[in-house]
Image: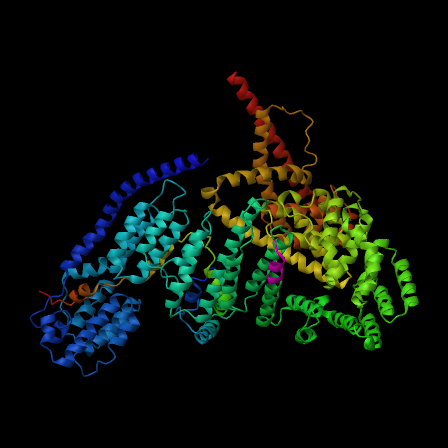
Amino acid sequence: MASKKSKQKNKRKANRNDLAKRQNQRLEKRLDPAAAFFAKSLEICPVVGPSERTEDAAVFNREQRLNLAGPLQVEAANVIESLELTSLGQFEDAIAKLKDIARSSPFSDWRLFVRGLHAFYAGDVEMARQNWSKLDLTRRPARIASTLLLAETGQPLSDEIASPQKVLVEHVQTLRLRKIIVTAAEAIAKVRHRDPEVTFSVSQFAMLSNFISSFRKLEPEFVSRVGQACVGLSIKQGDMEVFDRLKKLVPGPADDPNWNRTKSIYMLDFEDSEELMLKASLAYIEQDLPKLSQMPEPLKKALSCKIYLRAATAEDEQLDGEYDFGSSFGPSKVNNKSVNSLFRQAIQCYPTYRLGHEKLIASLRKEYEWNDSSRSGTKERGTRLEKEILAAKEAMVRALPDEVETSLELIDVYLDEDELEKANALVKNLSGQRLKDPLAKALPWKLKLKEAMRLSRRKADLALASKALDEAELLWPVWLNKNWLPFLKAGLALRCGDQASFEKLTADAKESQKTSPLVGDLMTFAALQEMNIPGPDLKAFRTKFEPKLEKAIELELSDLFSLGAFFWDLTRTGFKHKAYRMQASKAGKAFVNKLKNFTKEDLSPVQIDAFSWGAFHKFWPSGNDSLPSPDLLRRARKEPRFALAILGWLIGLSRMPKNRITDYVPLMVVAKEAARTEKDAFYRYQFDKVSDGFNALFQKLNAEEERRKSYGSRFDDDDDEFEDDEFDEFDDEDEDDFLDEEDDSDEELCDCPDCQADRARTRKVFDKELGGQVKAIAGVFAKLGPSGIVKLTRIIQQRMSPEEFVLAIAKLFPNYGISPEETLKFVMTIQNQQSALSEDFSSGPDPEAKVVEQSIDEIKAARKRREKELERKKHEASRSSR
Amino acid sequence: MSVTANNAHQVLELKLGATPEDLRKAYLALVRQHPPDRDPEKFRDIHAAYQLLSDPLAQATALLTPSRDKPDLMAIIAEAEKVRPRLAMLNLLALGNEAK
C-alpha cells in the first residue's frame, strides 16, 4: 500500500512539474500587459514647466526643493509624504502629514488638492470638484485636478486651464495602479489545476512570488490578503513543502506573524505529527505571542491555555495508543508527567477555564487507575497521585467557586478525613447557589449522618450521636433507599452497650430487607465500623462475610446483584466505606464475569442498581470487543436506568470507537425521554446530565470524523474503505428492516459471487439515495408540523409498533448526519402527538398520507427495478462474453 | 456573512488591539445604525462578532479551529475591484505638466 501511495505521489509531483512549466509560460504572457503599463508609466513623469512655481516643482524635483527656505523645505517634504501615503491608500495618515501647513503657506493649495483627491478616490467627484474649485488655476495642483476630472467626467476643472496632453488623459483612464495589481492577482487565481487535489500549485507559487515582490510596497494590504489566501489554499492540499515555502514568502496575519499557529492547526491533520505540532505551538506561545503588543492580554492567555491543552491532549492520546498497543509488555502510562505538566501550564494561563481543570483531574485519575490495576503500580505512587488529584480538585474549586460536582467530591473527601472545617466552608459556599443536583441538596443530611458517626467515637457523646442520627433520618433524601438506616441504628445501640437492642434491630433489619444473608452481614459490619465499634469486637462480624468475598467468583449471581445494589447506594451518595474500598474491586470483577451467562429478559430494580454500580466503576473491560453486547443494548432500550448505566460507562471510556457511537444514540433518546418522565429526583437529574454528556461526546467525535474525512482521501484511504464496508454492514442489517421489509422478492436471485458483488454495489448506490430520502423525510417532517407528522407516522406505524418506530428513527437518523438533538426533537414531537395519533387513526384514510405512502413504495419499487435491471445487464454481458 | 475570528474585527470596524471599551462603543454604534427590527441579518453579524470578541476563550477557540472553507481568492479580488483605483505618485504629478 505504501509503495502504491508513493508511486501515486511521484506521479502527481511529475504532473505538477509539467503543469508548472506550461503555466509559467502562460504567466509570462499574462504579466506582459502589466509590465508594459509599468514601462509606459515610467515615461510619464512630471516635468518642470517654464512658468512653474518653485514650490510646485519642489514636490517632485530635489534641486528646486533645495532652493526653498528651510521651513518651506519641510512643508514640501510633508506634501511628498502625504502624496505617497495617498497612493498607498492611507488617507488618514496622509491628511495628518499636512496639518501644520498654514492657509498663508504657498503649500496650502497642495493641502486642498490632497483633500479633493481623497474625495475623488472615494468616488465623490462633486466633493472633489468643490475642494478643487478653490485652487489657483495657474498652479500644478489645479492642472492635475483638471486632468483627473476631464478623464473621469469629460469636464475640466475650468476652461481657463489649457487642455492637457491627450496621452495624460488616456493614462488616467487606463493606467491605474490597482487595476494592474488586480489583473496580476486574477492571473494567479485563474490558474486551473488538472489534479483536483491540488489547490495551490508550484506555478502559482512562482506567480505569487513575482506578485509580492512587484506590488508589496504599492498595495501592502491587498497583497497581504492575496498572499494569506494563497497560504490558506496550500493548507487544503496537504502538501507541507508548498506551505513551508509559502510561509517564508508571505508574512502571516497580524495575530500569527510567523504562521506558527496556523502550522500547529495544520499539523493536527497529519498522522504522527504530534512533535511538529507541539514545536509550532510552543513557538507561537513563547516567541510570537509576547511580541504581539496589539493583542489583548486576556486573548493571549486564552490562546496559550488552549494550545497547551491541545498539545497535552494530543500527547495523552499518543500515550494511550502506546498503552493499548503494548500493555502486556512495555510502553505504559508510567510517565504521564509531561502531559500533566502541559495541563498545569494551561490552567496557569487561564485558571477560570473549566476544561483545563477537568482534563488534568481526568489524566491524574487515569494514571491512578493504571497504577491501581497494574502489577508495576506502587502504593507510594498511588498515595502521591491521590494527593495530586486532591490538590487539582482544590485548585479547581478555588478558581471556580460555582463548581458543584468537584465541591461535592471534595466535601466527601474532607468528611472522610474528618476535616469538617474545610467541608463546612464548601457547604457554605454551595448553599449560596441555586443547585439542581440532588446530591448537593442532600448535603445537610450527609453532614448530619457524618456528625452522628463522628460523635459515636467518644462514649460521652453517644447521646448526641443518637440525636444526630435521628435528625439524619428526618433529612433522609426521598430518592435514597433507607435500608442502611436500621443497621446504623443497631450499630449505635451496640456502641452504647445495648447488646439486646443491637441483636433485635439487626435481625429486624435483615428480615425487612429480604436481601441475601451475605449482604446483611456486610451491611451490619459497615454500620458497626462507621459507629466506631472497637477493632477486636469487629473481628467476629468480619469473618462472617470476608472469606466469602475473598472468593467472590464462587458467589451466586443473586448475591452479587444484592451486593452491587448496596455498593451502588454507597457510590452514588459518595460514602466510601472501608469495607467497600477493600472488597468492591474483587466483587465487581466477579460480577461482570458471571454476567456472561445472565440471560434474564426483565431486570429488577436491584439488578439495575448492580449494573449501574458495575458501569460506574468501569468493571467492564473497555476494549473494542467488550462493548455492551447487542443483547444488553436491546434490554437497555427498554429500561431507562439501565440505558443510563451504559451511557455513563461509555462517557467514562478514555477512547470511544467512533464507528460504534451511533449504535448508542437510541439509548440517549431513551435517557432524554426518561428525564422528562422520571419521578425519582436523583435519576431525573442523572438522565439529563448523562444524555447531555453523551450528546457532547457524539458531537465531538463527529466533528473529529468530519475533519478527518475532509483530509481523508489524501491521508488515509484505507480507513475510508473500511468505514464504507462497515456502513454497508449496518445498512444491510438495519435500514432494510426499516423501510424494506417487503423487499424480499419472489424471484430467486443468482448467488454467484459476481452477482452478489453487483448487488452489493447497487445496494450501496440505493442506500445513499435512501439516506437522502431519510433526510428529506426529516426535512418534510420539520415543515409539516405536528399534524403532518401524525399523518406520516401513522403510515409507518402500520408497519411497526410506535416503540420500534422511535428506536428505528433514533438509530437511523444519526447515520445520515442528522444530529442527536434534531433526532430527539423529532422523536419527542412524535411522542407528544401520541393521543392525536390514536384519534387520527380512527378517522379513516387521509389523502395526503396516501401520497406519502405511495412515495415510500415508489422508492422501494425503484430499488427493486434497478436491482433487476443490473442483474439482467450482468447476465447479458456474461452471455455475450461467452 | 458568517462571522469568524478572522473577520470579527472587520465586522465591528475595529483594529486588532481594540480595548474592551472600544469594542463596546463600536458595538453600540453599529447596533444603532443596524437595529434588529430593520436590519436583522446585519444585526446578527454584529452581535455574533461582539460576542466572539468579548469572550477571549471563544475567540481563542475560533482562532484555533481550522477553517473548513477554502479561501476565496476571487472574492478578495472582486472586493478590491470595487475600490477606486489610485495612481502612482509620479504619474499623478505628471498630470499637471504644462500643455505644450
Q: Is residue A671 above or below residue B19?
A: above
* Of the pair A265 and A369, the residue shown nearer to us: A369
How many numbered circles does the render carry?
Answer: 0
**Whole-percent x and y of residue A57?**
12, 72
Magenta part of the protein: which range? A377-384
Residue nearest the observer in this picture, A518 or A532: A532
Residue at x-position 13% and y-position 80% = A70
Residue A249: x %, y % from top left: 30, 55
A807 in magenta: no
**Going by the picture, which residue comes out furthest to the left?**
A50
The quadrant in which residue A452 appears is bottom right
Majority SS type along the magenta span: helix
- The percent coordinates of residue A525 (x first, y second) are 82, 61
Q: Looking at the picture, does residue A802 appear above or below residue A69? A: above
Figure coloring: rainbow
The residue nearer to you, when weighing A141 against A723, is: A723
The residue closer to the viewer here, A513 or B92, is: A513
Q: Residue furthest front?
A: A536
Residue A65, x across and y down, in percent? 12, 74
Residue A475 occupies quadrant = bottom right
Left or right placement of residue A73 versus residue A241 in this view: left
| Relative horizontal placement of residue B8, taking residue A479 as reference (left or right) | left
Q: Left of A871 or right of it: where is A301?
A: left
Instruction: Confirm whether residue B51 shows in the render.
Output: no
Query: Residue reaching furthest top?
Result: A882
Taking A10 as reference, is A538 left or right?
Answer: right
- Quarter assignment of residue A18: top left
Q: Is residue B88 visible?
A: yes
